[in-house]
Amino acid sequence: MNRRTLVTSVATVGTTAVAGCSGFLDGNETGETTNDPATPVFSTADASDRERSQPEQVDHEHLVVLKNQAESPREVRLTVFDRRRGVQAYLLQSTYEPGFDDAVYDVEHADPTGIQSYEVRIEVDDETASTVLWTNQCYGDATLTVTADGDVTATVDTC
């Protein structure tokens, strides 16, 4: 009988310890965050907040490249959001001619410190796409594209 009590006690303590490490005992069991309604909500759906297991080197120079493959000029809104500081680092709204393919921003201008993440978003008409870019050597440039059929895509080169 004492052995069962001991095993039950150890299992309870172990479960409580693991729950504490996973953040479920910090009062925010849902893991949700609250945002000011005036602040745009930027996604973390790509699991970019995951812990890194390998050493990484800082690399702040990452270009944001815009391409317009549509057959007509397109009004584009581009946003770079600094996820660490919770602020918009860059906003560009302009009309781009067909065939436009050039860098429009360098994340280095946002004055990143260490390795941090930026969400890069493109909005054209009712279409929106975004990607997350980290300031390390394993991430390359972000490419935001208006496709020939009018869709928008956002990709980032990774190693």
Image (tube, rainbow, N blue to C red):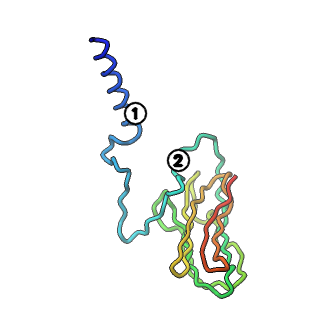
**Quarter of the image where one finds residue 68:** bottom right
What residue appears at the point 71 percent right and 75 percent down from the top-left corner?
Answer: 102
Q: Position of residue 20 (x, y in %)?
A: 36, 36
Name the residue type under label 1: Val
Q: Which residue is mark 1?
A: 18
What residue appears at the point 66 percent right and 55 percent down from the top-left corner?
Answer: 139
In this picture, is 113 found above or below 97?
Answer: above
What residue appears at the point 61 percent right and 84 percent down from the top-left corner?
Answer: 74
Q: Secondary structure at mark 1?
A: helix
Q: Which residue is mark 2?
A: 50
Crowd around label 1: few <14 · some 14–19 · many ≥20 (10 Å): few
In this picture, is 32 found above or below 42?
Answer: above
Lower sequence index among marks 1 and 2: 1
Q: Position of residue 88 (x, y in %)?
A: 49, 68
Q: Position of residue 16 (x, y in %)?
A: 34, 32
Q: Secondary structure at mark 2?
A: loop
In this picture, is 13 found above or below 106?
Answer: above
Q: Position of residue 7 (x, y in %)?
A: 34, 18
